[in-house]
Amino acid sequence: MHATQTQRSEAPQEMQEPVWQTVVWDDPVNLMSYVAFVFQQHFGFSADRAEVLMLRVHHDGSAVVAEGSREAMELHVEAMHGYGLWATVRQAGEQ
Amino acid sequence: MKLLPLSGGGLRLLLDLDEAAMLDQLVTQLRQLLESHSSTTLDPDPLFASLEVGGSDETPEDPALARLFPDAYSGQADASAYRSVTEQGLINRKLQDAMDVTAALGLGGGAPSTSPVEVEITPQTLPAWVRTLTALRLAIAARIGLDQSDDRERLLEDEETRGTVLVFDWLAAILESVLAIFAAGESGADADDDAVDEDEDS
């Protein structure tokens, strides 16, 4: 299971690899049931977890659905685009 | 349109002939759109078809293509670099999905039958179906300018776009029903055992 909270530790991070995020954005076309389905199918989230993230996308306009290396996030975003979700890669802390 | 759950986790989709013909035509148009943006002929060998070469590095001008292949980064340089190594692969996989749906509908060639068209959707073929239905809805929405959630109502009232919005809603109804049947099947029995192993894409 991927961490989904944005980690914003104040501790010095120069020694650490930067954290990248997969962000899924709300759009007026994709069905809520479909977005939750994609989260289960691709990330292996439980139905409840997928529902929570889907609702976060819907209500907040976007949600971080995965964090990790840039390469891993790029693969997730490519899969999201394959499913027709609007997703982007960003470094943690960017808006 | 009717859907019947099947024991074993799949479903049977029953379409009237005119419904099946419309879906087949829409998927064909989607394939033409994707092919118009593809710089390589889709190789019948899936090994070569999955090679991610030949992608553009610019956001497509066509709004439907731009929505199907969105920028992965907000910065232009990163978005271009990413697109140049991923886009052709995405095009190929969407084409493959669309061809799977066309093949399952089975309308190509042969005398048209008058009976309903029956298609089985299994856990294995589900991803190609839902991705293709979604790609159609995204392309249609982009074509008629359905960019905000409140655009739909206005477009439905406009004579010019009303029919297209009805098709858009019909595709949503199929997608919603298909997902509901699969979700019900999974939450029924052994949800933990077979929840996560169907899709290996990307």
Image (spheres, rainbow, N blue to C red):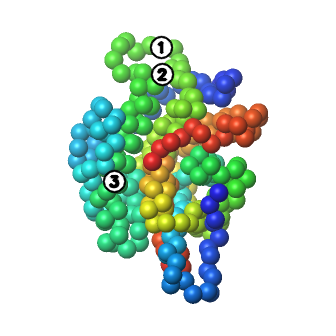
Residue under label 3, please give it: B87
Q: Nearer the viewer, residue A76 or A10?
A: A10
Residue contact at pointers 1 and 2, CB within 8 angstroms: yes
Residue located at (44% from left, 31% from top): B101
Left or right of residue B172: residue A5:
right
Query: Callout 1: helix, strand or loop?
Result: loop
Badge 1 density bin: few <14, some 14–19, many ≥20, Cα 10 Å: few
Residue type, mark 3 in image: Glu
Vertical order, B141 against B24 (above or below) = below
Query: Callout 3: helix, strand or loop?
Result: helix
Tag 1 and tag 2 share a subunit: yes
Task: State which tag comes first along the sequence, 3 or 2.
Answer: 2
Residue under label 1, please give it: B114
Where does residue A86 sit, x and y in percent of width and height? 48, 59
Residue located at (67% from left, 25% from top): B8
Badge 3 density bin: few <14, some 14–19, many ≥20, Cα 10 Å: many
Which dot marks residue B172?
A: none
- Eye-nearest disc, 3 or 2: 3
Residue located at (56% from left, 66% from top): A67
Residue under label 2, please give it: B17
Task: State which tag comes first along the sequence, 1 or 2.
Answer: 2
Res A90 visible: yes
Left or right of residue B123: residue B128:
left
Residue type, mark 2 in image: Leu
Quote the CA–CA distance across marks 1 and 2.
6 Å
Left or right of residue B86: residue B176:
right
Q: Nearer the viewer, residue B103 or B189?
A: B189
Where does residue B13 sit, x and y in percent of width and height? 57, 26
Q: Which chain does the residue under circle 3 lie in?
A: B
Res B161 visible: no
